[in-house]
Image: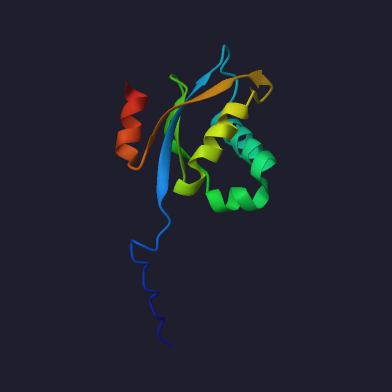
Amino acid sequence: MLMERIKPLIPTLREKKRYITFEIISKNHDFGLKDLEHSIKHEFKELYGIDGQAKAGIILISKRYDLAKQKGIIRINNKYVDKLKLSLAMVKKIKNTDAIIRTLITSGMIKKAAEKISA
């Protein structure tokens, strides 16, 4: 039995993604990457539900997170960028630590979004 390859989607039918660079303002950095991801996804789910969260496809890119500067990148569907920005603004605590998440830049390319982390 031969396995048939599935044809890839043409670029016009693929979901477009955006990269949002953010920074965390907090006096104490007592939380990890998993705690941050949980807080962001929890707040998004509270505002837009499980269906909205699934359609948005929120992914915190762990390789692009700078623990020292408290800056990172989130990938999301382009239709949900404004909703994610609202959710980031609504996050008040990360693992019982007061924190504010501020968005720096929104980009269609990860390279341009990553430049803001190193700056």
**Nearer to me, 97 or 83:** 83
User: Which residue occupies 56% across, 18% down?
Assistant: 29
Looking at the image, residue 25 sits to the left or right of residue 18; the answer is right
Image quadrant in which you'd find residue 14: bottom left
Report the quarter where the C terminus lies: top left
User: Which residue occupies 35% across, 34% down?
Assistant: 113
Report the quarter where the N terminus lies: bottom left
User: Which residue occupies 65% across, 36% down?
Assistant: 43
Looking at the image, residue 12 sits to the left or right of residue 96; the answer is left
Decide: is 83 above or below 23. below
Image quadrant in which you'd find residue 10: bottom left
Q: How was the colour assigned to the protein in this rendering?
A: rainbow
Q: Residue furthest bottom?
A: 1
User: Which residue occupies 66% across, 50% down?
Assistant: 50
Task: Give the x, y percent position of residue 53.
Answer: 60, 48
Task: Give the x, y percent position of residue 75.
Answer: 45, 42
Decide: is 70 above or below 10. above
Decide: is 23 above or below 13. above
Total count of labels: 0
Task: Give the x, y percent position of residue 24.
Answer: 51, 22
Q: Residue furthest top?
A: 27
Looking at the image, residue 107 sits to the left or right of residue 37; the answer is left
Image quadrant in which you'd find residue 108: top left
